[in-house]
Image (cartoon, rainbow, N blue to C red):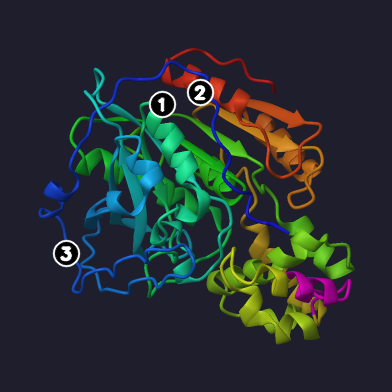
Amino acid sequence: MNVTGGPIRVRRAGTVLVAAACSLTALVGCSSEPATSPATAPASAGTATAPAPEYNLTGVPGTVLASEDFGARSTELTATGATLYRFVYESTSGVDGSQTAVSGVAAVPPGIAPAGGWPIVVYGHGTTGVQADCGPTLYPDLLGYQFAVQDFTELGYVTVLPDYQGLGVGGGTHPYLEPRTAGNNMIDAARAAHTALPEVSTRWAAVGLSQGGQAAWAANELASSYGLGLDLVGSVALSPPTDLTPLVRSGMDGTLTDPQKELLPYLLYGAQHVDPSIDPKDYSGSVAEANNELLLTCQGGDTEAKERAVQAMAPDEFAADSIESEQRLLDTIGRYTLPQVRSETPMFVAYGAKDDIVLPQWTREGVERACALGDSIVAQEQPEQGHDVSDEAAMQFLAAVFAGQSVPSTC
């Protein structure tokens, strides 16, 4: 069972851009330093502990707060010749507007920067968990996402993989699937790369799968207000959750699929950090409550034990204990629904007709709502795919928007 929407290799649809290596570490001295140094990530991808330093936040989103070399940790990424950094940058909570510290990895291709500077791709990862040690950048293989970083870097993009708020840096909270926070984190990852690295363009694209697809969609909606100073050329949202209220209702009426049952503890955890009056115990049956710690561990942990717990769950394992609790959760999760405002730049959306996590009708309805707002969307339903979809057409879209070509909407 896999609810992550795992990383998939990109198809090289566009012309490979000529690229150049830059130094992030040299510029970090101008920004705030942590009171304590981040812990070194482990040499294996088994477990990790997120550092919990106190950063001197500046109030300026995108400011790089700390940086360290990442290249020695990943043979797959260093083989591309890229220069790699793990860094911490400043962003903004979508829940309360507070400033936060978010970690990420940046990869800069080798060679000479193209005219106008390096274009940027910010790649939003799928679900890895909700706890601080679930940040991909704590692991040498980026929890499998080294392939996405490797492929986009080889295409000639400065590639940034953010962990999202609360993952990768200890001491924070992860409001799982709250889109404004993830969208801000994506935008500020691009902003950090542009401001801290030499010869980097303001032109960027937001790309993501599953949770990252939602983040890329949200970044597109927020770009015209929060993303000032950057030039978003387009976004790619693969299997994005656009409306999670049907998932909550499925928990109430006992129609969740097994992968969705694995997802619900994460969703409840995140909802509590958006609305502290929500108590996950009010929506958890005996199996979910007894296995709460196990169910909240990072993806790739004790998978077999998780599967046994899910198989033991009753159909109505995540039914609310009262009408009031049900409405409280629906109201909170309803605030996550996309679209929320009209997007100003083109978006590619792909989803699988056989997806048993984010059901295809949910994404289809989200696209219809976005089209009604006047969004420019290229939507593709893939008849034979589940949650992991092909990105071949997405890469063609990405090459076109970076080239300044007009992409006809399917709305």
Q: Relative to 95, does residue 394 appear above or below in the rendering?
A: above
Residue lying at 71% horizontally and 28% vertically, measured from the top left: 380
The answer to which of marks 1 and 2 sits earlier in the sequence is: 2
Residue lying at 20% horizontally and 44% vertically, measured from the top left: 196
Kindly state the secondary structure of the residue where label 2 is placed: loop
Kindly state the secondary structure of the residue where label 3 is placed: loop
The residue wearing badge 2 is 12
Q: Answer yes or no: do the residues labelled 1 and 2 have beta carbons within 8 Å?
A: yes
Q: Nearer the viewer, mark 1 or mark 3?
A: 1
Front-lying residue, 80 or 377: 80
The residue wearing badge 3 is 33
Front-lying residue, 17 or 121: 17
In space, the residues marked 2 and 3 are separated at their CA atoms by 38 Å
The residue wearing badge 1 is 155
Q: Quadrant of the N terminus?
A: bottom right
Q: Is residue 328 magenta?
A: no
Classify mark 1: residues with Cα within 10 Å, few (<14), some (14-19) or many (20+).
Answer: many
Residue lying at 25% horizontally and 25% vertically, measured from the top left: 117
Q: Relative to 177, does residue 329 appear above or below in the rendering?
A: below
